Amino acid sequence: MLADAGFAANSEWMEGDRIARALARIEAASARIEAAAAHGAPADATLQARYDRLRSEAEHALAEVDALIKALES
């Protein structure tokens, strides 16, 4: 019985660590995208549309991750 409790606690820690690493990768990717955008690439309407769509999808994914974290913390 104690082994099961230890496994559950370790499993929760490992899941939290996995989420933290994923969030760190997402934040790093976002910072790289923002830095690249700040360098002022030549105007390209198609590229801008793709960037806007990617940014929207990333914001949506981050909101889903945030909701998952809140659900796991409850």
Image (cartoon, rainbow, N blue to C red):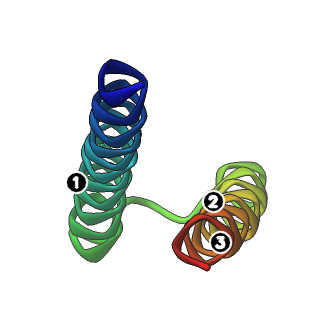
Q: Residue at x 38, y 35 (%)?
A: 5
Q: Residue at x 31, y 71 (%)?
A: 40
Relative image position of residue 15 (x, y in whole percent)? 40, 38
Q: Earlier in the sequence, mark 2 or mark 1?
A: 1
Give me the C-alpha separation between circle 3 and circle 2.
4 Å
Q: Disc 3, disc 2: CB below 8 Å?
A: yes
Relative image position of residue 73 (x, y in whole percent)? 52, 74
Hey, what amino acid is under mark 1?
Ala
Q: Secondary structure at mark 2?
A: helix
Residue hosting label 3: 59
State the residue in front, 64 or 54.
64
Q: Is residue 36 above or below residue 2?
A: below
Give me the C-alpha separation between circle 3 and circle 1.
14 Å
State the residue in front, 72 or 24.
72
Residue 55 falls in which quadrant of the image? bottom right
Q: Secondary structure at mark 1?
A: helix
Residue hosting label 2: 58
Residue 50 is left or right of residue 44, and the answer is: right
Residue 62 is left or right of residue 45, and the answer is: left
